[in-house]
Image (spheres, rainbow, N blue to C red):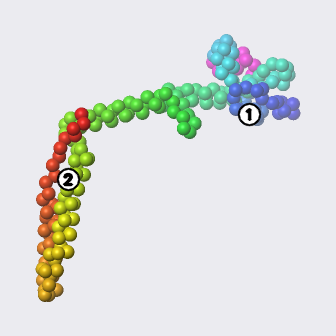
Amino acid sequence: MASEEIKIVKSKSAYEYNPRKSGKLLNGKDMAEFAGISEQAFHRNWIAQGCPSVPNPARPSEKCYPSAMVMKWRFDKDSNNLREKLIGQVEISEGEMTIIEAERRKKQADALLSEFALADKQALVANIDDIMHNVGTACSGITSTLLGWRANLPGLLTMQDEDAISKILSEEVSRILKELNTTIHEYKPSAKK
C-alpha cells in the first residue's frame, strides 16, 4: 500500500509514523479543528515547536498531520512544561545544574546556616575543640594511672592468692573508671564570632 510507505518529514520530534497506530491523516486546518485551536495558532505555535508531520499521500509537496501522533507529541510537550513549572527544573544531564536547582541549594544552605547561628546564640552548639581537649585531658590522666600500674601492681599483688589478686585488680579498675566518670568537662564558648 502506498500509505504505508510514507516517511516522516524531518522535524524536531522523535516520533515515528506508523499508519496503523498514528491515527487519521489530517491537513493543517482539520488538525487545528481536531485539537480545538485556531489554524493560525496551530501554524504559529505547534508547527513552529516541531509538530510531527508526514507528506500528503495524494500531494507529496503538502504536509499531513497524523492525529494520534500529533496528540501524543502535544501531550508529552505539555507534560514536560508542567513538570518544569511544578518541580522547578527540567531534566538535566549528569554533572549539570540548572539555575533553579542552584537557587534551591543556596536557600537550603542559608537556612542551615541560620539554624546553626541561632543554636550557637542559644549556647546549644558545643565547640568540638574544647570537647576534644577535655577528652584528651581525661585520657591522659587514665594513661598515666595505667602506666603507674607497672610500678605499683607488682608490689600489691606479690604473695597474694587468686581471690585477693582479683579483688585488687577490680578495685584498681573501678578507681580508674570512677576517675574517668567524675572528670569535669568544661565547655568554653567558641572565641570565633
Q: CA distance from mark 2 to mark 1?
A: 71 Å
The image quarter in which residue 72 lies: top right
Give amino acid for label 2: Asn
Residue 31 in the image, given as x and y percentages of width and height: 70, 20
Which residue is at 87% across, 30% downward? 2
Badge 2 vs badge 1, beta-carbon distance below 8 Å = no
Residue 47 vs residue 163, the one in the foreground: 163
Residue 164 in the image, given as x and y percentages of width and height: 12, 83
Q: Secondary structure at mark 2?
A: helix
The residue that mark 2 highlights is 134
> In the rendered view, does 152 fall on the left or right side of 45?
left
Residue 43 in the image, given as x and y percentages of width and height: 69, 15
Q: Secondary structure at mark 1?
A: loop
Residue 67 visible in rendering:
no
Image quadrant occupied by the N terminus: top right
Whether residue 192 appears in magenta in the rendering, the answer is: no
Give amino acid for label 1: Glu
The residue that mark 1 highlights is 16
Is 95 placed above or below 37 here?
A: below
Q: Which mark is residue 130?
A: none
> In the rendered view, does 97 fall on the left or right side of 40?
left
Span highlighted in magenta in the image? 26-36
Is 107 placed above or below 140 here?
A: above
